[in-house]
Image (cartoon, helix red, strand yellow):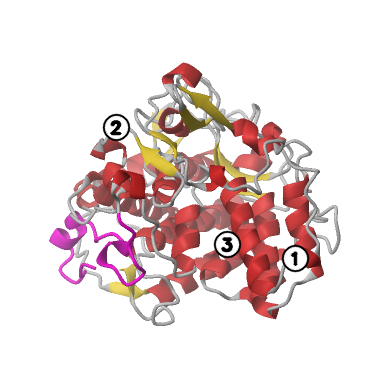
Amino acid sequence: MKNIIKKLFSFVIIALVASACQKEDALNPVPTNAISDLTAFDTKDRIEGQVRAVYASIKNAGMYGGRYQIFNDIRGEEFHNERTNVVTGFDVWNYTPSNSSTNSVQNHWSRAYYVINLANIFIDGMATKGTAVVGTTLSNNFIGEVRLLRALSYYSLLQLYARPHWDGNGSKPGVPLRLKGNTGGGDFALARATVDEVYQQILTDLNFAETNLPLTYPTAILNTTRAHRNTAIALKTRVLLSLRRYADVITEANKIVSTTAPFTATSGVNHSLQANIRTVFTAPFTTSESILSMPFAANETPGTQNQLGFYYGPSSFNGGSGEYSLLSTGIISDPGWKTTDNRRTFVQVFSGKSWLTKYQIPSTFIDFAPVMRYSEVLLNLAEAIVRSSNTVDARAISLLNAVRGRSDATTIFTPANFANSTALADQIMIERRIEFLGEGLRGPDLTRLGLPLPAKAASGVPSVPPTGQQYIWPISSSELLLNPLCTDN
């Protein structure tokens, strides 16, 4: 927050940047001129340039460009820290970011609110002038995009800095809910909204986005990297799963998942599983399975010591730093994950240790950073069906088989494999650990279910119970210093 306030006057300059002639598939347009807030909403090109600026900010390495996914990966039981470097998340891995001044705590907080403020500035500007320039329909398209990105930012904050919704049914302190843009000095005192209040704002933003976003874009790159209607629906299944609103997860998922296999989205972008999962993680990264990814062009990088490939790839594979190898006691030891499963090809051994090689591009490590894939929607739906019905449901098994079967055709689950609904739910969670290894879903899965943060016994790291102080992070010291109404965890 300190960085935000110190740079408030620069927010508009950063946000209100556009290129007069942007290619349709520009991933991170290079600013050619800074536009003052007085003229930033004068033309469609300038307005769309601001939308792109919000995307460019949320794909910063400190957010969904890599580090947010990594933080949530290493809070789980799959990875071993190799370098004891706090800069690259050693404190996150061993559950000791207890100091509100640590880099991890401060940097994610400030970057998330930076994105939120850019979104708020844009929404305010569209109400004042921009809508009159581009018309109501296109204005709502653009606003839908930035509201979805604002929702993603608030969701990320809740996963790290607030108690899970199940604790007190959302009544515990969440984060300050800022919905107006800051373009100059002022009073920034604002108490923390409750967890439920923040979640409700997230859902309000995503509902607006669903209603107003385009059904599709004209190119695969835009359908992968800019939000459309199905992006909002898919993200709602994730948010509602965090709220344990399983019936609502089913309602949302059914909008974009056909009744029977092969499962596809029959309206909007035609999402479906790829026949080979390796295709999803191979350039150009624009398959129909990739609902939202953060893109990186050949001339850019997610940032030094931040990229997914840098963290997980050893030097002998892609020139990475090898910050985190795979724990031998983690999911790679599961006997049900067969050696013939195609996803096993993402695990390779170098110098006697197992490494995740899902992110393959050598330095500068410009693999697209995944945010949401269609396989997650299928497993979200399967889990919600089982947890809401408490039955060994046939459709849930079919959804599970769709994800497992595309990588391992030799495994076909049947009702006879599951003694009860708990056993089926457990298998779905195992599938999530396999399918999304290194994609940042494990941390939120643990906390939404009230599970302990797991011990890393070989490294002497004890588990953290759901009631433990270290289950969530402290609030950034900069926020506490500059916002007298904000309390710490």
Left or right side of 338 for 434: left
Is residue 148 at least partly visible in the picture? Answer: yes
Q: Which residue lies at the image location 48% right of the left edge and 67% below the top edge?
A: 448
Q: Nearer the viewer, mark 3 or mark 1?
A: 1
Q: Main secondary structure of the magenta part?
A: loop
Q: Which residue lies at the image location 44% right of the left edge and 50% below the top edge?
A: 77
Q: Is residue 165 above or below residue 51?
A: below
Question: Residue 281, how many percent across, how many down?
Answer: 63, 33
Residue for badge 2: 83
Question: Residue 315, how many percent across, how many down?
Answer: 42, 19
Q: Which residue lies at the image location 44% right of the left edge and 74% below the top edge?
A: 165
Residue for badge 1: 396
Q: Earlier in the sequence, mark 2 or mark 3?
A: 2
Q: Amino acid at mark 2?
A: Arg
- Density class for disc 3 (Cα within 10 Å; few <14, some 14-19, many ≥20) is many
Q: Are marks 2 and 3 in contact (CB under 8 Å)?
A: no
Q: Earlier in the sequence, mark 2 or mark 1?
A: 2
Question: Residue 222, how many percent across, how many down?
Answer: 65, 39
- Range of magenta residues: 462-489
Residue for badge 3: 238
Left or right side of 58 for 283: right
Q: Is residue 136 above or below residue 39?
A: below
